[in-house]
Image (spheres, helix red, strand yellow):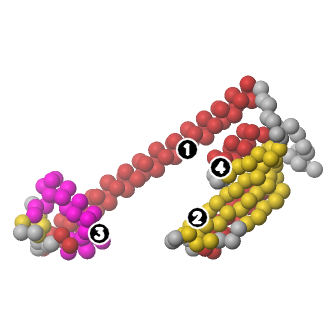
């Protein structure tokens, strides 16, 4: 019997629900089973019971969930589990009461802060990458418009079709390009400035 399987005061028995949305149906079914395998392989948890739902269609995506009954070693590992596995529901079945020292609580808060800082760092990195992608897309679309207009003037809907953008988004971009003096509009046609 492993250390985790021995009943100890800091161990928590929990009922946890994890839900996955997406498509195609087969992908989310496989992804959720893989997710549960990853949880089973983690040394901080014992999965006692798992019940998978059938995938159900919700508008354009599918939804599937699993209900797990688990033993988790300590509140700190439960909080880590919540950050790492993003369950939609957590119910602590046992113990009925938890007690901890101020040092235990401080350690939990510090672990929580470390995870929050990591999430913040990832969000900032993704925001930076997103900004760079937007800038590069804008430059690429600007070059596309200039190349198209190099030969002749074009109507907004024709430019939108060549750029692969909906007319509303193309109109916004074309308006910006006029403001920046890259192009000009004459008689409902755009031309190079």
**Which tag, 1 or 2, sits closer to the chain's start?**
2
184 magenta-colored: yes
Of 54 and 120, nearer the camera is: 54
Residue pointed to by mark 2 = 21
* Residue 119, numbered label: 1
Residue pointed to by mark 3 = 166
Residue 43 seen in the figure: no
Q: Nearer the viewer, mark 1 or mark 3?
A: 3
Label 4 CA crowd tier, 10 Å (few <14, some 14–19, many 20+): few
Q: Position of residue 163 (x, y in %)?
A: 27, 70
**Which tag, 2 or 4, sits closer to the chain's start?**
2
User: Of helix, strand and loop, which one carries label 1?
Assistant: helix
Label 1 CA crowd tier, 10 Å (few <14, some 14–19, many 20+): few
Q: Quadrant of the C terminus?
A: bottom left
Q: Position of residue 93 (x, y in %)?
A: 80, 47
User: Of helix, strand and loop, which one carries label 2?
Assistant: strand
Q: What is the CA distance from the residue labelled 4 to the residue labelled 1?
A: 11 Å
Task: Spot the residue most to the right.
Answer: 1
Q: What is the CA distance from the residue labelled 1 to the residue labelled 3?
A: 34 Å
Q: Are marks 3 and 2 in contact (CB under 8 Å)?
A: no
Which residue: 58% across, 70% down? Answer: 62
Q: What is the CA distance from the residue labelled 1 to the residue labelled 2?
A: 21 Å
Q: Which residues are magenta?
A: 158-185
Where 179 falls versus 59 (above or below)? above
* Residue 84, numbered label: 4
Side of 6 relative to 62 (left or right): right
Q: Are marks 2 and 4 in contact (CB under 8 Å)?
A: no
Task: Spot the residue most to the left.
Answer: 187
Side of 98 relative to 125 (left or right): right
User: Of helix, strand and loop, which one carries label 4?
Assistant: helix
């Amino acid at each position: 019997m492993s250390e985790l399987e021995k009943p100890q005061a800091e161990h928590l028995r929990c009922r946890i629900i994890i839900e996955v949305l997406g498509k195609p149906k087969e992908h989310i079914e496989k992804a959720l089973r893989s997710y549960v395998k990853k949880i089973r392989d983690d040394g901080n948890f014992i999965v006692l019971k798992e019940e998978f739902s059938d995938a159900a269609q919700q508008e354009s995506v599918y939804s599937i969930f699993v209900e797990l009954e688990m033993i988790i070693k300590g509140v700190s590992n439960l909080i880590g589990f919540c950050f790492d596995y993003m369950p939609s529901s957590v119910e602590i079945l046992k113990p009925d009461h938890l007690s901890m020292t101020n040092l235990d609580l401080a350690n939990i808060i510090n672990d929580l802060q470390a995870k929050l800082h990591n999430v913040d760092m990832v969000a900032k990195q993704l925001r930076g990458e997103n900004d760079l992608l937007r800038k590069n897309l804008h430059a690429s679309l600007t070059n596309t418009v200039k190349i198209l207009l190099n030969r002749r003037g074009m109507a907004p809907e024709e430019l939108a079709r060549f750029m692969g953008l909906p007319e509303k988004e193309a109109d916004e971009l074309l308006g910006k390009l006029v403001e920046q003096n890259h192009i000009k509009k004459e008689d409902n046609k755009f031309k190079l400035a």
